[in-house]
Image (spheres, rainbow, N blue to C red):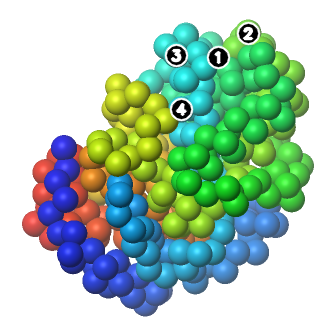
């Protein structure tokens, strides 16, 4: 387990990391597959650290809402495991894919059983599973209730314009959903499951809200108890091995903590037993993960000693 080595130094470390991000020339490339994301100012950067029972610390643009995109996959996974338990694993695996977030390749080879719940195909199956016995409105209502309870914030909402744009451009996701259906691994019509999936991706949160929402995965005294300790351990394991698509190994190597990224430039990282950290910067690296966000997490891990693999000597 990571230890809270430097609580008094955290505010200064955050300011330092935000200043370094602000000065950075290489900011990555903003996602441009929908106009709502393409129009985001790449110069923004935010970081927030939430710890059970303590005030959330922030630096940079931590009050600016952004599209959480694939970070939503971990909240939907928590919901699906709560409803189906281990039955979910009959439909989706727990192995890293080593392929991009929307790859079709393995799905064909592995007969419609996605590698993990954090690539698009696996997330579509997870959402489809939550739709067992629920309408899309009920499933999305349950997701929002979960996220709001986790963050302790009723203001969190879905951006309908982003969801509509996702629907217009989501040809690859439609291909994945139809392919899953052809293998009997999609119970609902593709339009229905994807309509729900696109809305979950369109949840908007600030960095502060996202860090607070991650507290349920920190565990320990004072953290909100929305899932069991055993489930916290397993969701964190999946975040570590699969949370950054084909860049998951690189994130584990550089940061050493479980994290889940989204194409909107957000990353939620868990320091087990200690903290939930959200970073946001819209420019992406070649894996589709936030470029400055990853760099900031690498620096934070080095300066605090936070890592599940032991402390770093410094970057
Ligand atoms: N809405 C995006 C998609 O499904 C999410 C991808 C991501 O955040 O990585 O294509």
Mark 1: C-beta under 8 Å from nearest atom of ligand 1: no
Disc 2 marks which residue?
Answer: 184
Tell which circle, 3 or 2, labels the residue nearer the N-terminal end.
3
Above/below status of 102 relative to 207: above
Above/below status of 274 relative to 121: below
Percent x, y of residue 199: 78, 45
Mark 3, secondary structure of its residue: helix
**Closer to the observer: label 2 or label 4?**
4
Q: Residue at x 86, y 21 (%)?
A: 189
| Mark linked to residue 78 | 4
Instruction: Report the Cα–Cα distance between label 2 and label 4.
Output: 23 Å
User: Do residues under tags 1 and 2 come within 8 Å of each other at their CB atoms?
Assistant: yes
Disc 1 marks which residue?
Answer: 112
Tell which circle, 1 or 3, labels the residue nearer the N-terminal end.
3
Tell which circle, 4 or 1, labels the residue nearer the N-terminal end.
4
Percent x, y of residue 20: 37, 85
Instruction: Report the Cα–Cα distance between label 4 and label 1.
Output: 22 Å
């Amino acid at each position: 387990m990571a230890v809270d080595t430097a609580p008094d130094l955290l505010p200064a470390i955050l300011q330092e990391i935000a200043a370094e991000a602000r000065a950075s020339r290489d900011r990555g490339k903003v996602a441009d597959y929908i106009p709502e994301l393409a129009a985001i100012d790449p110069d923004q950067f935010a970081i927030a650290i939430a710890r059970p029972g303590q005030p959330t610390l922030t630096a940079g643009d931590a009050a600016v809402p952004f599209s959480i995109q694939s970070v939503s996959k971990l909240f939907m996974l928590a919901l699906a495991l709560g409803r189906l338990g281990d039955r979910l694993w009959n439909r989706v695996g727990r192995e890293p894919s080593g392929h991009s977030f929307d790859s079709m390749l393995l799905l064909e080879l592995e007969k419609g059983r996605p590698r993990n719940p954090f690539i698009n195909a696996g997330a579509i199956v997870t959402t489809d599973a939550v739709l067992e016995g629920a309408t899309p409105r009920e499933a999305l209502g349950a997701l929002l209730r979960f996220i709001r309870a986790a963050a302790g914030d009723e203001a969190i909402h879905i951006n309908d314009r982003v969801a509509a744009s996702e629907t217009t451009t989501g040809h690859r996701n439609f291909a994945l959903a139809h392919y899953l259906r052809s293998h009997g691994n999609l119970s609902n019509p593709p339009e229905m499951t994807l309509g729900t999936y696109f809305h979950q991706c369109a949840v908007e949160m600030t960095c502060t809200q996202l860090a607070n929402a991650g507290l349920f995965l920190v565990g320990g005294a004072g953290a909100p108890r929305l899932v069991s300790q055993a489930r916290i351990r397993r969701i964190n394991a999946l975040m570590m091995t699969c949370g950054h698509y084909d860049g998951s190994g690189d994130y584990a190597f550089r940061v050493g903590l479980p994290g889940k990224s989204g194409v909107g430039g957000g990353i939620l990282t868990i320091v087990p037993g200690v903290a939930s950290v959200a970073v946001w910067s819209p420019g992406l690296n070649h894996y589709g993960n936030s470029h400055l966000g990853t760099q900031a997490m690498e620096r934070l891990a080095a300066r605090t000693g936070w890592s599940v693999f032991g402390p770093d000597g410094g970057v």
